[in-house]
Image: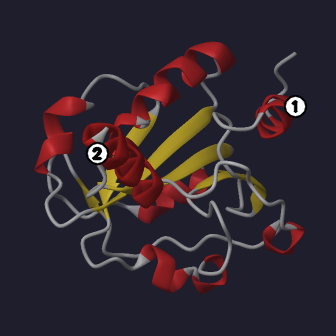
Amino acid sequence: MKYIFLFCLLVMSCIDNPNTVWNSKIIGETIIYPDSLINIYNYRVVNTNRLISSSKKVVVDVNGNCPICIFEIYNWVDFQEEINKEDVFFIFIISATNPEQFINSFKGTLHNSIFVWDKYDQFLFKNNFLENIPNHDIFLLDSCNNIILFGSPFYSKRIKRKYLKELNIP
């Protein structure tokens, strides 16, 4: 019983309410990337122009200090296979005190993606309109980095259908 309680506590502490509240106020808002993002594979500062220039992109802000949040990255492997689109770019922004665990865990796992370390936790600071939004950690952006959708396609069939529709997947 003690282990079940600990497991539930861990899950509840890492994951926001999976029943995403649809807040259209942030649809159309522009995501700003901090200049301090670091590629976790080579520890070089990321050229944010590359992040900006992709046609459509999924941005995932990952709490790297949360084991369940880290494990959820594997859901994106299945999602990439399902959509099977080369023109969709995936950006994983890792907020963690030490990103070492990501270096070998996900290398080569996800194609058409980049893992960056938000060393100074500037992503939410630069995008302060996200602070009071539940499930503010996953976005589908257009080529101008405007939010088209937000929320996890893994916890809501409605949101997943919206992602598939926006990505032109039947």
Q: Position of residue 68 (x, y in %)?
A: 36, 42
Front residue of 96/18: it is: 18
Q: Residues within 10 Å of mark 2 (few under 14, many from 20)?
A: few
Q: CA distance from mark 1 to mark 2?
A: 31 Å
Q: Which residue is drawn at the image coordinates 16% and 40% (left, top)? A: 103
Disc 1 target residue: 165
Q: Position of residue 147 (x, y in %)?
A: 74, 61
Tell us which disc is closer to us: 1 or 2. 2
**In the picture provided, is 125 more to the left or to the right than 7?**
right
Q: Secondary structure at mark 1?
A: helix
Quadrant of the rendered structure where residue 102 is? top left
In the image, what residue type sits under mark 1?
Answer: Lys
Q: Which residue is drawn at the image coordinates 46% and 55% (left, top)? A: 12
Q: Position of residue 144 (x, y in %)?
A: 71, 61
Looking at the rendered image, the quarter that the C terminus falls into is: top right
Q: Earlier in the sequence, mark 1 or mark 2?
A: 2
Q: Which residue is drawn at the image coordinates 39% and 79% (left, top)? A: 122
Quadrant of the rendered structure where residue 47 is? bottom left
Front residue of 124/141: it is: 124
Front residue of 11/80: it is: 11
Q: Position of residue 148 (x, y in %)?
A: 80, 54
Tell me the colour scheme of the image.
secondary structure
Name the disc covering residue 67, or none. Answer: 2
Is 140 situated above or below 136? above
In the image, what residue type sits under mark 2?
Answer: Pro
The answer to the question of whether label 1 and label 2 lie on touching residues, with beta carbons closer than 8 A, is no
Is 71 situated above or below 11? above
**In the picture provided, is 57 more to the left or to the right than 1?**
right
